[in-house]
Amino acid sequence: MSQPNDMSLPNDLDALWMPFTANRQFKQAPRLLVAAEGMYYTSHDGRQVLDGAAGLWCVNAGHGRRPIVEAIRRQAGELDYAPPFQMGHPKAFELASRLARLLPGDLDHVFFANSGSESVDTALKIALAYHRQRGEAARTRLIGRERGYHGVGFGGISVGGIGANRKQFGPLLGGVDHLPHTHDHTHQAFSRGQPAAGAHLADELEHLVALHDASTIAAVIVEPMAGSTGVLIPPVGYLERLRELCTRYGILLIFDEVITGFGRLGAGFAAERFGVQPDLLTMAKAVSNGAVPMGAVAVRKGLFDSFMTGPDSMIELFHGYTYSAHPLACAAALATLDLYRDEDLFARAAGLSPYWEDAVHGLKGHRHVIDLRNLGLVAGIELEPRPGAPGKRGYEAFLGCYEKGVLIRVTGDILALSPPLIIQTDQIDRLFGTVAEVLSGID
Ligand SMILES: Cc1ncc(COP(=O)(O)O)c(C=O)c1O
């Protein structure tokens, strides 16, 4: 048996079970990132790689930002950890207040978690507890949407709508149903921004209400723009309609803004961008610029207040994490919010988005491209699947871009681009130029 200080242990790739990765394939030709600065990663073989994905939709202010690095360093030296149950630390309260001020409308109470998945499960639990609290304990049904991604907890995959993420894991949560996804090639292909067609798909909620009765439905959860499934932009009027129906039937509306929060769509949050107010809003990723794991759920004032009704000595919600509002995460998030404010990055993203949109749609007519979608600083480039080998062409495009020094994301045959909001126009040109070149070179 090896000892912990056994220096003879080889540092090979074997022991790590990598998430959402074809482990054996990866280890035959590994891609390791060893440093990052601004818009670029450095790979283990010393190449500069332009980050077209903000890491994994998280590094909105760009990499290695000194104020964030310094804030984390300072915090680690000052207060490494504080228990979040029955105790607090100042930055947790400060961050909640800052977020409440940034969030639209009366989303002004914040519960902290450590990831998007935890934030989603937290939001679902709050929704269930809320109805029970108000004497509507029969409202236990949760409604998600096909192709939705809400992380990997049991709650998240139950309301999620990506088959591959569900099928290995048994029956999941009971009492869950799904709306249809909003994508429709026939009527929406090559839309610039929000597609004009498709608002009626929100009316499917009426069918679920007819089927289950509103009195059994607790919440509807959707990504305002579906990211991980391959960038599905909400049709004009769709989210508004969903809001209207949820209000009519007393159903809570949860926006999962783990990707769309913090400037990605050219506004603080998608809720603001679309002018639609959810009852709960989940966030993670860019809240701390990806530098320290953090997630959070914001809830509307009335919802929070309804929990603050029993005796003062009563714990109102039996939920929380050892690392809720971890001091290092709070320090990173506060420094991140300062950067977003001082560099006006959300407005920067909005200002760049017409240039971005033209760059995206410049690929129209290009080999293999069957659809192009864009919103804010997000692009979805859908490729025609290679006959008999779905996903292969997308994966080869991803590898080809990486070899040419550009990091993108791929979901099946859909390429997703979502760079840090500090991207420059010549870097946008390089991103799309590289994608075009790579697509020309693959079968
Ligand atoms: C909309 C959405 N919700 C939840 C998650 C899960 O976040 P995490 O991977 O931090 O658990 C993601 C991750 O991409 C996401 O895009």
Image: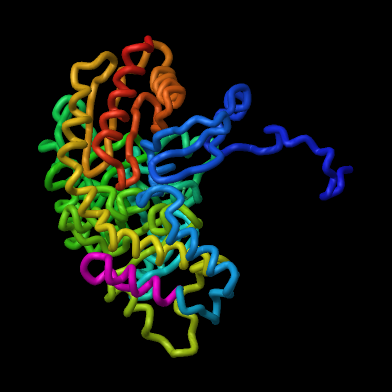
- Segment colored magenta: 92-108
Give the residue displayed 27% in from the left and 64% down from the top.
279
Which quadrant of the figure has residue 129? Answer: bottom left
Q: In the displayed structure, does residue 305 sit left or right of residue 58?
A: left
Q: Is residue 291 magenta?
A: no
Q: Percent from the top left, x then y, of residue 425?
A: 24, 37
Give the residue displayed 28% in from the left and 48% down from the top.
264
- Is the stretch drawn in magenta largely helix, strand or loop? helix
Q: Where, quadrant-wise, is the N terminus in this rendering?
A: top right
Q: Percent from the top left, x then y, of residue 373?
A: 22, 33
Q: Percent from the top left, x then y, of residue 166?
A: 48, 39
| Residue 180 visible, this orientation | no
Give the residue displayed 16% in from the left and 32% down from the top.
358
Q: Where, quadrant-wise, is the C terminus in this rendering?
A: top left
- In this picture the colour scheme is rainbow
Furthest residue to the left?
Answer: 196
Location of residue 336 with respect to 400 vertically, above or below: below
Location of residue 147 with respect to 253 vertically, above or below: above
Which quadrant of the figure has residue 81? Answer: bottom right
Residue in the foreground of this view, choosing between 12 and 209: 12
Which quadrant of the figure has residue 140? Answer: bottom left
Residue in the foreground of this view, choosing between 384 and 143: 384
